[in-house]
Image (cartoon, rainbow, N blue to C red):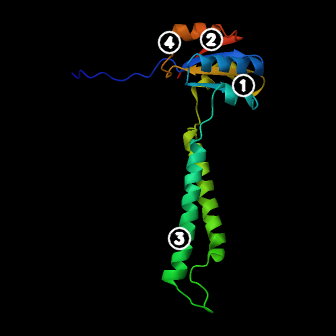
């Protein structure tokens, strides 16, 4: 007989609170952030720009990756054009210089845009965890209202501060319309 233990899936993804108005949701997000929770998300039927500040969503990893890739594309494009013109296929026509900066601007620009654009798209998809055809919040029956007229905030059980009873009482203090468990 084997004595090793098998890992079991967590029985709770998190707790979700439903709010009736965007103002209530933004106020709740500010309080959740101020309480020290970091693994939580808000769901709305339309963009609410105040949520970015309320949830402290100022992550710049995508823009950093895009800038680095654009810089690599710029240097790479100019280097490739310079190598082709001066080393691989040098043509001295009319005494012109082999490395002519104005002539290399289009290829440098195109390589910059190509690498930056592809990196922005790929890093955005991967850092957002996409594609994700399934998410546990869809297990909550009332969550269907998130695409029409309801506003939700979900605190994940993976948050270091998450405690089932304490988190539920905290969410109750926010005066939501309803609190639901989110099954994984």
Q: Nearer the viewer, mark 1 or mark 4?
A: 4
Q: From this viewpoint, is residue 83 visible?
A: yes
> Residue 70 lies in what quarter of the image?
bottom right
Instruction: Provide the secondary structure element on which disc 2 rests.
Output: helix
* Residue beneath disc 4: 163
Verify CB contact (< 8 Å) between mark 4 and mark 3.
no
Verify CB contact (< 8 Å) between mark 2 and mark 4.
no
Residue at 57% of width from left, 90% of height from top? 92
Left or right position of 158 against 31:
left
* Residue beneath disc 2: 171
Residue at 70% of width from left, 9% of height from top? 175
Instruction: Provide the secondary structure element on which disc 4 rests.
Output: loop
Separation of disc 3 and disc 1 at Cα?
Answer: 50 Å
Counting residues from the start of the chain, the first of labels 2 and 4 encountered is 4
Residue 87: image location, x then y, percent: 48, 81
Counting residues from the start of the chain, the first of labels 3 and 1 encountered is 3
Separation of disc 2 and disc 1 at Cα?
Answer: 18 Å
Depth check: give the residue in front, 170 or 128.
170
Return the mark for residue 146.
1
Q: Nearer the viewer, mark 4 or mark 3?
A: 3
Number of numbered tags placed on the structure image = 4
Verify CB contact (< 8 Å) between mark 3 and mark 1.
no
Verify CB contact (< 8 Å) between mark 2 and mark 3.
no
Separation of disc 1 and disc 4 at Cα?
Answer: 25 Å
Image quadrant occupied by the N terminus: top left
Return the mark for residue 56.
none
Instruction: Provide the secondary structure element on which disc 3 rests.
Output: helix
Residue 152: image location, x then y, percent: 68, 21
> Residue 153 lies in what quarter of the image?
top right
The image shows residue 67, relative to residue 166, as above or below, that is: below
Verify CB contact (< 8 Å) between mark 2 and mark 1.
no
Separation of disc 2 and disc 3 at Cα?
Answer: 57 Å
């Amino acid at each position: 007989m084997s004595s090793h233990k098998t890992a079991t899936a967590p029985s709770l993804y998190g707790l979700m609170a439903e709010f009736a108005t965007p103002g209530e949701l933004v106020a709740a997000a500010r309080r959740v952030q101020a309480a020290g929770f970091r693994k939580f998300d808000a769901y709305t039927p339309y963009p609410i720009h105040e949520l970015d500040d309320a949830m402290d969503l100022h992550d710049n990893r995508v823009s950093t990756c895009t800038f680095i890739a654009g810089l690599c594309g710029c240097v790479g494009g100019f280097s490739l054009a310079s190598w082709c013109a001066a080393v691989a296929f040098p043509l001295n026509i009319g005494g012109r210089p082999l490395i002519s900066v104005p002539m290399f601007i289009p290829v440098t620009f195109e390589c910059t845009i190509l690498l930056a654009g592809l990196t922005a798209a790929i890093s955005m998809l991967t850092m957002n965890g996409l594609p994700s055809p399934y998410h546990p919040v869809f297990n909550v029956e009332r969550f269907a209202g998130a695409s029409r007229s309801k506003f939700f905030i979900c605190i994940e059980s993976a948050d270091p501060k998450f405690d089932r009873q304490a988190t539920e009482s905290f969410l109750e203090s926010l005066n939501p319309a309803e609190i639901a468990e989110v099954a994984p």
